[in-house]
Amino acid sequence: MRHTISVLVENKFGVLSRVSGLFSGRGYNVESLSVGETIDPQISIMTIVTTGDDQIIEQITKQLNKLIDVIKVTDMTEMDHVEREMVLLKVAPRQADKAEVLNLTEIFRGRIVDSSPKTYTIEITGNEKKIEAFIELMKPMGIKEFVRTGKVAIAREGVRKKG
Amino acid sequence: MKMSGAEILIESLKREGTKYIFGYPGGVVLNIFDTLYDDKEIKLILGRHEQGAVHAADGYARATGRPGVVLVTSGPGATNTVTGIATAAMDSIPLVVMSGQVPTMLIGNDAFQEADIVGITRPCTKYNFLVKDVKDLSRTIREAFHIATTGRPGPVLIDLPKDVTASKTDFVWPEIDVRSYKPTYEGNKWMIKQAAHHIAKAKKPVIIAGGGVILSGASKELRELAEHTDTPVTMTLMGLGGFPGTHTLSLGMLGMHGTYYANKAVQDSDLLIAIGMRFDDRVTGKVDAFAPHAKIIHIDIDPTSIRKNVRVDTPIVGDVKNVLAVLNKVMKEEINEQWNEVRKAWLKQISVWREERPMTYTWSDEVIKPQYVVEKIYETTKGDAIITTEVGQNQMWAAQFYKYDKPRTFLSSGGLGTMGYGLPAAIGAQLAFPNKLVIDVAGDGSIQMNIQELATAVINKLPVKVAILNNRYLGMVRQWQELFFNERYSHTNLDVVPDFVEVAHAYGAVGLRATKPSEVEPVLKEAFRIKRPVFIDFVIDWKEKVYPMVPAGAPIDHMLFEEQEKKPEKKLKAVR
């Protein structure tokens, strides 16, 4: 099963490679990983999306906790949380499709962040399904390239465990 | 007063109680070596290869329980420590390894003797540091010792750029608090209660004691638990000595080359009490078929050890000594009158297995059996010695035929299985215990992996004894080839083995040899009398194999025994 794990780490030199090294060294999957500073610049937060059965997820959580630089590990999947991802997508539509591109961007509450005579660059934020859906819709329009940030997640206030 | 980084380093090591540094000099650590030159309190033990220096520090740590300290130069000096560090990491041995590094401004430039040792050792250290500012140095050293020696111990590396050791600052000895590192020492009370309950109800319990018992100094508590509850104890390789091998409740080692009765007991048990061990594949054999009827209580300080390889019914994270102390207390209330009756049947069943297949080997009048050598070492020393081993057949025979009654008397590379460990480890142990008999049970293959360390023993007047079980083969691998690869002995015949007696002489040590069984005891006695390092070349039966044996991937009660060996030996090329 797929899990979104939030990892609070010391913002130290090499911490990313300690975490990614743990995943590669023990053969765990990483679907996406994003890192950024928190309100305390000495602490960073990583959001890791990984897959595995319960036993593997338990090991991943424990192994992450075992890393000296890791302060806290939270499996977001176990709690109510909000997930977001952003994609920047460059599309080169035919003249006839341009209106449709703008239309879809509007529907998905996206923004055009750059345009050229031949292309639009669109920013879309949302959960994974929304991003996937938008990419699917844009495919026939002629996607040139896109970049995804990977997921970030945060617990909803008044957290309680599911079930 | 301003002090240089090198001076701060030495002062910090003293405050951490360091008496010996195992090391090897080089360009970027010259500042440190220069400081050491005048120092009266810390002695540098010069190895002959950095790997040897790390193993020696490791042997020192295993024998004493104190962290081993290593100092090497950058580049090749640092990379040569990797096997030693990985060896210590797998067996949870506290080491602080300091490596020189090129000056900070050159890092990343592929400078002369530059290696990204922090990157290289990241997966095989508990933690590692690169010190970029001399102001961070003393705190880093303090943190390194703290991390290496607490929780589940392990090696920590500190990379020291040359300019950091040269630049000056005020010495401070700061209090430290690593907020993201808080090991759990006390076991969950409720879980301990549950464990006690399981033990009280069990009809066929077995304790499996691992290296954690020795690391946490819990032998006394373990013995109390075993005796109080009449529970037999088997040990992993790392656990040998954690419970007295001569005790009536001892089943010896379990697993691939464990005793028949230990493996039978585990497979038949209804409760396993796993203490400070991690269910290595050499212990469990086929995991799905491991102890099929047993509930499992697992006590370990490292949460990742629990439920990594086997299912666990009662997990207890905590320091083994603490947990056992509480468990023993709780246990006192749990025991009822029928206890002894229930246990009697189980212990009787075990003694039946014990009689059915005791640990034996076939005696020969003509050729020395390696097991006999180990037995004689045990008899001659009366078990009052520190035994180190190399890896392979020698290691297994040393584990099977010598009875370890005390912790920290059997030093062996368990997890990584590092050939070349035994001699330098013996040197480290001998340094810590100058008056103890320290014996490396070696093979002719393994001893050649760090044979240069004999010079370290000679120059430091460390009278280590090396019993080389010489079969002119990489015996353990040959054993697998014989049993599982149709006797195709691909590259396991060493053919040219040096004359170890002459090698010893060349290094200024003593060399002895035994070629007949009748010579074994006299030669051992002579060697133990000599107050110098001694190589003893035991020319052993090269056909001898380690039995019992569980083929890799089989359940641990599917054992092969010597008498099942029916194969004609004609295909073996006789080497003597």
Image (cartoon, coloured by chain):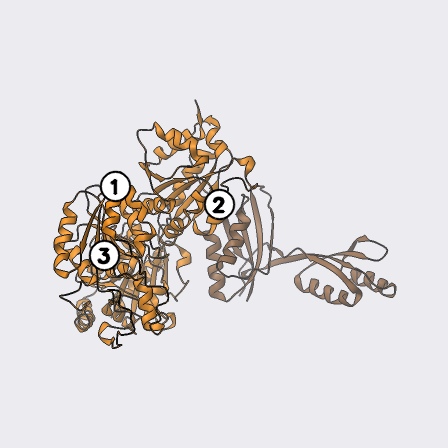
Q: Amino acid at mark 1?
A: Val
B151 or B441: nearer the viewer: B441
| First in sequence: mark 2 vs mark 1 | 2
The disc label shown at residue B243, or none: 3
Q: Nearer the viewer, residue B378 or A80?
A: B378
> Can you tell which of label 2 and label 1 is closer to the viewer?
1
Residue A15 drawn at (x, y percent)? 53, 47
Residue at 64% from the left image edge and 57% from the top image edge: A150
Quadrant of residue B16 in the image?
top left
Q: Nearer the viewer, residue B12 or B201?
A: B12
Residue B381 visible in the snapshot: no
Q: In the rendered image, which residue does mark 2 sit on?
A: B118
Q: Label 3 to label 2, Cα distance in Å?
A: 38 Å
Foreground disc of the pair 1, 3: 1
Chain of the residue displaying label 2: B
Q: Answer few, some or many: residues within 10 Å of disc 2's Cα (few below 14, many 20 plus, some between 14 and 19).
A: some
Q: Residues within 10 Å of mark 1 (few under 14, many from 20)?
A: many
Q: Is residue B376 above or below residue B155?
A: below
Q: Which secondary structure lies at badge 2? A: helix
Give the percent coordinates (x, y) of residue B151.
38, 48
Residue placed under numbered mark 1 in the picture:
B458
